[in-house]
Amino acid sequence: MKDINVISISGGKDSAAMWLLALERDTPNLKVVFSDVGHEHPETYEYIDYLEKELGPITRIKPDFSQQILRKREVVDTKWRKEGVSERIIQQALEVLHPTGNPFLDLCMWKGRFPSTMARFCTVELKVRPMFDQVYVPIFEGGNQVISWQGIRANESLSQSKMAETEETPEGYTIYRPILNWDVYEVFKQHDKHGIKPNPLYKQGMGRVGCMPCINSKKEELYEIARRFLKKLRGWNAGKKLFQKLLSVDQQHSLLVMTEDMVSMTLLNGRKQLMAEYNTTF
Ligand code: SF4
């Protein structure tokens, strides 16, 4: 039985620093994984390729919600009918409820809402669960153990400051947080030491790298995203429109609560500046 050291990388500074630390220590049985949620910035995808070229192979996984969407279709098709929902509404919902292949958008379609800081289901559904199902389970089935490296730092939040460096999980794997006591300076220093560039998005006003935008983005970061990446936002907005079509149908069925979504927040925060800079309206 072997211990397999699994490092999940997001394209951000902390997970890259952690990978560099693992290499520095000649950590055996290293498996580096990137979960593609379909909602990262193009520069992050390029950065993942860069890291792979410089540091070694990366296993790419992708969350898949097609089964959940299929089950939701069945609910619409059967339960909604029994409950007397009008045929027009049922047909509207069925027309939209198809997997798009974009995990983030499909997750929203399945849940009937966007994640938020108050309903942070995205990390579990897009990162934790796919990692367990697609990476840990095959390792367990091969008779081996998992040590899950997490690039968490204590000074990032109150909840993280209470975390231990190692932890045994009920699912039977060990969590290891090797940079728990590092500060951001040490993280960037680790990149320098190994001649590895940090993700270029940090130089473009991004405080965090992951989904674009992340539900935890601060207002200044949302403004930078809106100011710099208008094209990306417009593409994302197309997905949002598809989702909102479903949402309006769901609302008629009184199942869902409309939430202020991230793109609307972005546009709200940067609206005046955007209109001035791009001479456009949304
Ligand atoms: S990066 Fe942000 S939006 Fe994406 S899964 Fe993590 S917490 Fe959610």
Image (cartoon, rainbow, N blue to C red):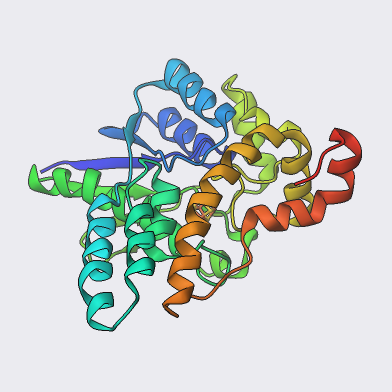
Q: Position of residue 159 (x, y in %)?
A: 55, 69
Above/below status of 103 relative to 27: below
Determine the residue located farthest toward the bottom in the rendered image: 83
Above/below status of 3 relative to 171: above
Which residue is at a point 30% across and 34% down the rendered structure image? 31
Whether residue 182 is visible: yes
Which residue is at a point 41% across and 77% down the rendered structure image? 253
Whether residue 210 is visible: no
Q: Position of residue 262 (x, y in %)?
A: 63, 56
Which residue is at a point 48% across and 64% down the rendered structure image? 247
Q: Position of residue 150 (x, y in %)?
A: 43, 50
Above/below status of 158 relative to 56: below
Which residue is at a point 59% across and 27% down the rendered structure image? 43
Q: 281 or 188, which is in the foreground?
A: 281
Quarter of the picture holding the N terminus: top left
Q: Quadrant of residue 72?
A: bottom left
Q: Position of residue 143 (x, y in %)?
A: 8, 46
Task: Tell me: 159 left or right of 38.
Answer: right
